Image: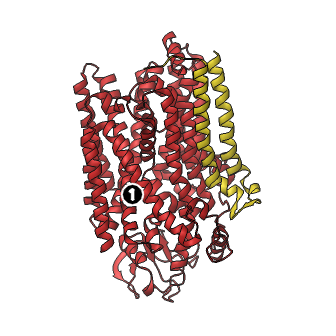
Chain colours: A red, B yellow
Amino acid sequence: MVAQLLTFIFVGISFSLYIGIAIWSRARSTSDFYIADKGVNPIANGMATAADWMSAASFISMAGIISFLGKDGSVYLMGWTGGYVLLALLLAPYLRKFGQYTVPDFIGTRYYSDAARLVAVLCLIFISFTYIAGQMRGVGIVFSRFLEVDIELGVIIGMGIVFFYAVLGGMKGITYTQVAQYCVLIFAYLVPAIFISILITNNPIPQLGFGDQISGTSTYLLEKLDRLNVDLGFDEYTSNTKSNIDVFFITAALMFGTAGLPHVIVRFFTVPKVSDARKSAGYALIFIALLYTTAPAVSAFARVNFIESVQEVEYENAPGWFKNWEQIGLIAWKDKNEDGKINYSAGDALDGVKPNYSDELGRYGEREVANKPDLNNSNEVYIDRDIMVLANPEIAQLPNWVIALVAAGALAAALSTAAGLLLVISASISHDLMKKTLMPNINERQELLFARIAAAIAIIVAGLFGIYPPGFVAQVVAFAFGLAASTIFPVLFLGIFYKRLNKEGAIAGMLSGLIVTASYIIFFKFINPELNTSDYWIFGVSPEGFGFFGMFINFGAALVVSSFFKAPPKNVYELVDEIRQP
Amino acid sequence: MNYWRANLLILSILLSIWFLVSFGFGIIWSEKLDAIMIGGFKLGFWFAQQGSIYVFVILIFMYVFLMNRLDKKYKSKKED
């Protein structure tokens, strides 16, 4: 109860802060609305980029996934940070020099073609909506668990807040709320991590702590974790289980996908100078690295704590968090050997993996599930990976205010990313679709009105995704990165580094990358999910990593097709020369 | 165009390091490096979950430094 009250206070204070900032930084022009009038300080932009980038997936899910995958989870750590090197070196400064409002703007101008612009708008809207659906689910989970309000009401409150500062403030409002949100989320992530690191290893720096000895013993934490994993029938925590080629491709797809994500790229349009765009990418990565180097430590600590606090414990004496999350529907226990104790080990506990709760209670008061137990193994626990970060402070028995802080941080992460995505969607509709294609005669005030209407509609659609989450959210995340890597990144890169590429080449490249990558993912994720194993994959590359392959298809098609058509007009050569100069 | 050449040289050097620490140390040779222990970390595991990220940050700031120096050298005019 006390924890819940504190959570209300923390979330309430942070939300009022965001609203206050929104009122202070209203947008007055289209330049304000789209790119904050190019007036953002590079350090502030770095923080805003970090908050924009670190979504509910980074804050809530990533450490949980790594906790269960061990070393295989490194693909997310390297993939989602390494992309910033590509962005800083290959795209950001040049696109800032180009100096327009949106990513399709560059594609449309550089390839002197409205068709290319429209293909880019399509890819962008698809990528962004895929992403938003995940954010709204995150908001829903936090509200239902910590504030005990309905998921629907939680999503509506979240939508209301985003609506307020995105529609009113545009990029300017979003930028300064994101700076505040970064501070909230990083504080909320580091505090429990530092606490737990001290508790387990006596080392206050989590990045060092998870390579340290468990306090009072001479056993290293990772050594112990390897042994626990093996004892329970899992692979060693610090060893690979996926093939190297697949890990390579997934990492690459995430890196190039990150560099091609429109809502991240557009952040570099907001700084005053080209040199600021470079510097800003550096600051952004520092701020991101602070969370991304802490995450694997959190994963390792959470794994040890989780196993030690439930393994062989009688259900009746199970810790409170275990039963709380069971109520939410993210943990289930099926007493296979009927000894009344929780037995956790490798394998799926339930037939059909996800629990399907009946309304009855079992012998020990646990929620009964209708699924048959999976009798191929002795594991009795179903646990959703998403709860590891949220439950971590409870598992480690940290004070209530830390739990409240984590809830506020998770909301900051989800809302900041949702707002950034909504903005690129609204800008691409009002600017690229309306102003530049369908209704070129509208004036600035009308364009601004369209931008606000588009943002409002996008928020409502995103909210509906949160309230009625489509079952395929998890599957389509691979899509967002795969498509960004195979469509947007190559045309931007070639647009800057290869002058001879003409519009025919660019369109052929985008479309072939899109079709090849989308077909591969749809085939394995939706049409034939039972074939989704390495035996059937092309070169052993999973759908998650196929975007990297699609990127080469894009490059190949673009270069070949381009050579059959005439070179771009002279003014395009001049444009490219121009953006190559700082 | 000398400025552009110099820029491409900087890019290729920095991106080679980028490739080496992540795809090289973190993935391809990761298991071989795991034979070396640094404290409680196997080295390959450390590069995959920590080291590569630190190097990425350093790379971007090296790029900022080198490009600012290059800009100054070519005395390019300030844009808007």
Q: Residue at x 65, y 70 (%)?
A: A213
Q: Position of residue B24 (x, y in %)?
A: 71, 46
Outermost top residue: A570
In the image, residue A312 sits, relative to residue A476, either above or below, namely: below
Q: Nearer the viewer, residue A39 or B1?
A: A39
Q: Position of residue A165 (x, y in %)?
A: 27, 43
Indicate the secondary structure of the residue bearing disc 1.
helix
In the image, residue A95 sits, relative to residue A243, either above or below, namely: above
- Would residue A556 be seen by someone viewing this image from the given angle? no
Q: Quadrant of residue A534?
A: bottom right
Q: Is residue A196 left or right of residue A272?
A: right
Q: Is residue A140 left or right of residue A213?
A: left
Q: Position of residue A76 (x, y in %)?
A: 56, 52
Q: Residue at x 26, y 27 (%)?
A: A447
Quarter placement of the N terminus of chain A = bottom left
Q: Quadrant of residue A344?
A: bottom right
Q: Nearer the viewer, residue A164 or A201?
A: A201
Q: Nearer the viewer, residue A558 or A449?
A: A449
Q: Residue at x 65, y 46 (%)?
A: B22
Residue under mark 1: which chain is it in? A
- The amino acid pointed to by label 1 is Gly
Which residue in the structure is indicated by mark 1? A409
Q: Position of residue A217 (x, y in %)?
A: 66, 77
In the image, residue A277 sits, relative to residue A297, either above or below, namely: above
For disc 1, the neighbor class at 10 Å (few under 14, some 14 to 19, many from 20) is: many
Q: How many marks?
A: 1
- Would residue A330 be seen by someone viewing this image from the given angle? yes
In the image, residue A381 sits, relative to residue A114, either above or below, namely: below
